[in-house]
Each structure stands twice: as C-alpha cells, then as structure tokens.
Image (cartoon, rainbow, N blue to C red):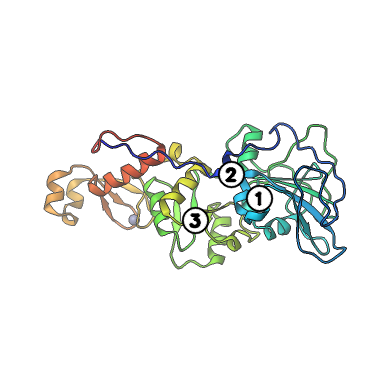
Amino acid sequence: MSAVPRRPDRPPAADRPVPHRPDRPPALNGTPVTNGNPRTSATPALADTSAAGAPVATFRFDPALEDLLPPARRGVPIEHSFLATPAVKDAIEALGVPHPEVGAILVNGHPAGFDYRLRDGDDVRVFGPVAIAAMSGAGHVAPAGAPAEGQPAPAATPGQGPVSLMRAVPEPPRFVLDGHLGRLARYLRMLGFDAAYRNDADDAELARCSAAEERILLTRDRGLLRRSVVRLGYLLRNDDPRAQLAEVERRYGLAERANPFTRCIRCNGLIEPAERAAVADRLQPKTLRYYDTFGRCRSCGTVYWPGSHYERMRRVIDELAGVERTEPGS
Ligand SMILES: [Zn+2]
C-alpha cells in the first residue's frame, strides 16, 4: 500500500530561529529613532515613506508573523511614521498583520495592549501566538493584564516578558468560516469540529458570529480580521482547501482533538446512530446489503454509512494526523 504523504512542511518563516530567548525580553535600547536613520544594528531599518518631521516608531515582528508582511519588510526593523497618536493596533494592521494574529506586544520593552497610543521613538516588538504559547509553556494563553486604555506601558519588573493579548481558544476549538471556504468547512465538520458556514454570510454577520459565539473566524480577508469585535481569528495563507486544513491543524492542533464522523458535513448538525430499519427507505438496496452501521443527522436527517465516501474522508484524517495508512477499509 502506498503511504499517505506526511503533513506538509511548516512555512519557512516558522523554521527560522527566533532572534531572542523565549524566557528573556528582547534587548531594546529605547533610543529615539529618526526616520531614514539606520539603527545601530547590523540590519538597517526599513523606513516608511513619510512627511518630514512626522513621529516615527520602529516595529519588529516575530518571524512567525513575517509572512503577513510585504516581502521587502521581512527580517528587518520597520520604521513606521504616523500622525497624531494612533493605537498600536492600527499601526500593526497598517503594516499588514491583523490583530487576531498578534499574541503580545512590547513597547520599549514593556507589555502593551492594542489601544496603547504610539509615541515618537517607540520601539515596538510584535509577537505571534505560537511564540507566546512557547513562552508560557502552555498551548493557549488566557489574556492577562494589559495596560489600561490610553496609558503608556507601565514600568516592567526586571525579567518581565510579553503579556498575552490572546483570547482563550475554546476547547475544542469551534469555527466560523467566510463564504469562500466551503470545502474547508466540510473538512472541519468531517473531523467533528463545529464549523459554522454559509456561502452568503456578509462580513458584519461573520464578525458578529465570531464575537458572540466565541468562534475562531477563518478567512482570507485581512480587512475582515481587522474589525475590532473579532478577537479570535486566523488569516489563511493558502488557497487550496487541503493546505488550509493543514494550516488550521498547525495553529489549533486539530488532529489530537478530532472526533471524526460525528458532525453532518452538509449542515454542521450532530450525527446520531440510526437503526437500519429507520433509514432503510432512504437507501439503495445495495447499500443496505453491504452495510450494517448507519448514522443520521439530527438537524437535516442526512443518512451516513461507512462507504467509499467514508474511506476518502478517512484518508484525509490520517494525512492530517501524519499517519501512514496501511490498511484501507479498516
Ligand atoms: Zn445535517
């Protein structure tokens, strides 16, 4: 039997070494930075185009977030000019990273919330959720005391690291998907995850559903994830549904939480066992002859049985779990 391909490799950014130790805040000198003036590091900062004399903050992003930046801005400090005192959330999103992707922020070495107001010379370090989880030693970190709205980052105690800004992910994770992700929704349901999906849902509905039901919003649309009400979300990097499923697996650990064939692929309802006699009138005689086990969706009544479709789904699940399939039909 041919082996199923292993899980796809992680994106290259994730393999790059993190430029600081997780248990040690990055060394930041806090020196005011002037636009176009290279910092005293080996890597010159990339300057924004800006009006002369505008305030400037320097941003550095966790390698895990760099694939969200334009290629020219990866791997270098970014000098970002601004007017007035924008929230750091808006500046991070203007650079290309939607706020639900951000695990923590340090400003001049101190933890900051999304509403921290940027000041001239600020040195901003932006971490992804994976980096924060590694620092805490936990899979997902509950939000903790970010600074109060509009306040500068407080003085840090020695050795203080980033404070997670992430909303706790529901266990098991549940999702809402935007209208272009029908195949991904089917895969997630096949794995038993609660995946709300309608191909005609508009952005406001999706954002509201994510916030009200604490669902992780999956989308390819950065603008949708910038909505402030969305606190749980993930920007899919790939167009291909199988690659998208692998991304969601890497981010949320689907394989270990999957409960396959418990949820209706059509409507997201739960599947319950059904007696043969109760579903016989809905099946072909051949199906009744070869199969003994049946399930039925509580919501829409769709009948399921372990046929060829089941085998295709089984292969997707095994691929996701990195299992080499040797016994088709088992
Ligand atoms: Zn159903």
Please tell me how crowded label 1 is: few (under 14), some (14-19), or many (20+) other residues with Cα within 10 Å.
Answer: some
Residue 91 horizontal side relative to residue 208, left or right: right
Residue 130 horizontal side relative to residue 248, left or right: right
**Gap between marks 1 and 3 measured at Cα:** 30 Å
| Residue 74's disc number | 1
In the image, the residue with mark 3 has its CB under 8 Å from the nearest atom of ligand 1: no
The three-letter amino acid code for the residue at tag 3 is Val
Secondary structure beneath label 3: strand
The three-letter amino acid code for the residue at tag 1 is Arg
The answer, for residue 264, to whether it is visible in the render is: yes
Check contact, mark 1 vs mark 3: CB within 8 A.
no
Q: From the image, which quarter does the N terminus lie in?
A: top left
Answer with mark 1 or mark 3, whichever residue precedes in sequence.
1
Disc number lying in front (2 or 3): 2
In the image, the residue with mark 1 has its CB under 8 Å from the nearest atom of ligand 1: no
| Residue 176's disc number | 3
Above or below for 201 versus 329: below
Please tell me how crowded label 3 is: few (under 14), some (14-19), or many (20+) other residues with Cα within 10 Å.
Answer: many
Q: From the image, which quarter does the C terminus lie in?
A: top left
Closest to the observer, 91 or 267:
91
For mark 2, what is the residue?
Answer: 13
Which quadrant of the structure image shows residue 259? Answer: top left
Percent x, y for residue 237?
Answer: 52, 53
Residue 129 horizontal side relative to residue 277, left or right: right
Secondary structure beneath label 2: helix
Name the residue rendered at 70%, 55% in the picture.
92
Above or below for 166 versus 205: above
Name the residue rendered at 78%, 51% in the picture.
58
Name the residue rendered at 44%, 59% in the picture.
181
Check contact, mark 2 vs mark 1: CB within 8 A.
yes
Percent x, y for residue 35?
Answer: 83, 57
